[in-house]
Amino acid sequence: MPELPEVEIARLCLQRWGKGRHVRGITVHDPRVVANGAPALRPLVGARFANFDRRGKNLLITLDKGRSPLGLWSHLGMTGKWVRRSPREEAPKFSRVELALDDDQVLHYADMRLFGRLRVVPGAAFEALPELRDLGPDPLREGLPPARLAEALARRKVPVKVALLDQSVVAGVGNIQASEALFRARLDPRRTANALKPDEVRRLATGIRASIAHTLKAEGADRLARGRGDITYVEEPGGPNPFVVYDREGESCPRCGRGPITRIVQAGRASYYCPSCQR
DNA sequence: ACCCGTGTTCGCTG
DNA sequence: TCAGCGAACACGGG
């Protein structure tokens, strides 16, 4: 379930589960999720988790081993997730890689669709990764200055919803957050990106940050960060939809009461919006 | 059987 | 050089 908020949750979980622990062993159930092949993960054995960072949807984990650090890059794709289990428990469905830790727990990387990837980064030199090269500002780490958003949108002639999916515009926004942010900004997703007025860009920047903050709260990030609550974050597939418009086609608008929330397809992806109050 | 899917990259076109 | 676009990747779930 990975856009910026879910990846941030994964970061907090991994930090909690892994920090200071050593990797005892690795089992690769499906080498397709390992960039450069399964043997590329071997250097992780014996390393100690030190730091857990995130850029957009990318997890950047640093481990200590000997005198030079080791990096572990993890992108969750569409269906990737990190899960902690006791070695006596059954592995989660679609577990592709497992890391055995020195506290007798196992971290599983599970990924049904296999769009996610793991990669060991020698020397933790994450700057060299092409996946990070063209990322725009990360709204949670460094905020989202309207001027910078305006600059990124200025050269795009596509609908603003489509532009928001480009990670070089804003790092971490995905298909759900794009619809949610545009609703909060009261902007029609079909508006051309480079035609937004300065005030509309400001509203959009605010909407993006508000949507991410709302999702983080709904998914329990505050409890995790404060060290309370269940240490095993497990999303409930049957749980209530925490979003304001996403996947709510036909419902009345929670803001204006009219709507109804409408689903359209843009660049092959679903967008949801209120035709009555998004202009 | 058919359509849909929280992501990204690649090759082609203008 | 680059924005834009569609296909491809892979495997369920409804």
Image (cartoon, coloured by chain):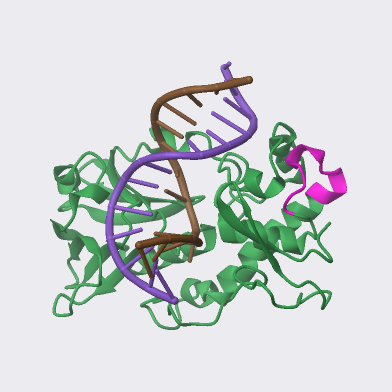
Chain colours: A green, B brown, C purple
Q: Is residue A170 above or below residue B2?
A: above
Q: Is residue A89 left or right of residue A51?
A: left
Query: Looking at the image, which is closer to me, C8 or A1?
Result: C8
Q: Is residue A269 left or right of residue A200?
A: left
Q: Position of residue A15 (x, y in %)?
A: 37, 64
Q: Position of residue A271 (x, y in %)?
A: 64, 58
Q: Is residue A20 visible?
A: no
The quarter of the rendered structure image containing the C terminus of chain A is: bottom right
Q: Is residue A26 left or right of residue A279?
A: left
Quarter-of-image position of residue A136: top right
- Residue at 40 percent across and 82 percent down: it is A230
Q: Position of residue A143 (x, y in %)?
A: 66, 51
Q: Is A38 contained in the magenta span? A: no
- Residue at 17 percent across and 67 percent down: it is A102
Q: Is residue A169 above or below residue A31?
A: above
Q: Is residue A271 above or below residue A134?
A: below
Q: Is residue A251 visible?
A: yes
Q: Position of residue A177 (x, y in %)?
A: 61, 60
Count how many numbered circles sit on residues in the image: 0
The quarter of the rendered structure image containing the N terminus of chain A is: bottom left
Quarter-of-image position of residue A272: bottom right
Query: Looking at the image, which is closer to me, A25 or A245?
Result: A245
Task: Tell me where the magenta segment starts and ends, as one range.
Answer: A189-201
